[in-house]
Image: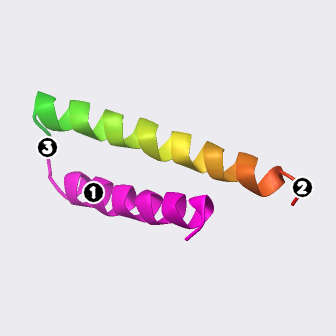
């Protein structure tokens, strides 16, 4: 497995976790904090993937 594969898999896991949270009609403050944390991690992973893909091999 490459780092990109690992990052893509984690990105998919975060996507699923966010979908589960977003399925709630309203969020508790704890859920809102968790959602924000997951979104930040997902964005960081997306940025890391972009950097890795931009590197010449």
Query: Could you tell me how far apart the alpha carbons at marks 2 and 1 are, in whole angstroms?
Result: 33 Å
Range drawn in magenta: 1-25
Give the class, few, some or many, for how many residues have Cα within 10 Å of label 2's Cα (few <14, many ≥20).
Answer: few
Image point (63%, 43%), residue name:
47
- The quarter holding residue 27 reads top left
In terms of secondary structure, what is the magenta stretch mainly? helix
Q: Earlier in the sequence, mark 2 or mark 1?
A: 1
Q: Label 3, label 1: how many angstroms apart (C-alpha)? A: 16 Å
Task: Between residue 43 and residue 10, name the one nearer to us.
Answer: 10
**Do the numbered discs 3 and 2 sit on residues whose CB atoms are within 8 Å?**
no
Which of the two labelled residues, at mark 3 and mark 2, occupies the earlier sequence position? Answer: 3
Circle number at residue 1: none
**Residue 19 colored magenta?**
yes
Q: Nearer the viewer, mark 2 or mark 1?
A: 2
User: In front: mark 3 or mark 1?
Assistant: 1
The residue beneath circle 1 is 17
Q: Which residue is mark 3?
A: 26
- Label 1 crowd bin: few (<14), some (14–19), many (20+), radius 10 Å: some
Q: Secondary structure at mark 1?
A: helix
**Residue at the spot x=54%, y=39% of the render?**
44
User: In the image, residue 7 lies at what x, y percent?
Assistant: 52, 57
Q: Position of residue 37 (x, y in %)?
A: 33, 34
Q: Which residue is mark 2?
A: 56
- Residue at image position (50%, 62%) is 6
Q: Earlier in the sequence, mark 3 or mark 1?
A: 1
Q: Pick the quarter of the image with the C terminus.
A: bottom right
């Amino acid at each position: 497995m490459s780092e990109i594969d690992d990052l893509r898999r984690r990105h998919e896991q975060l996507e699923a976790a966010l979908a589960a949270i977003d399925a709630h009609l309203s969020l508790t403050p704890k859920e809102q904090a968790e959602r924000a944390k997951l979104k930040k991690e997902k964005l960081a992973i997306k940025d890391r993937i972009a950097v890795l893909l931009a590197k010449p091999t």
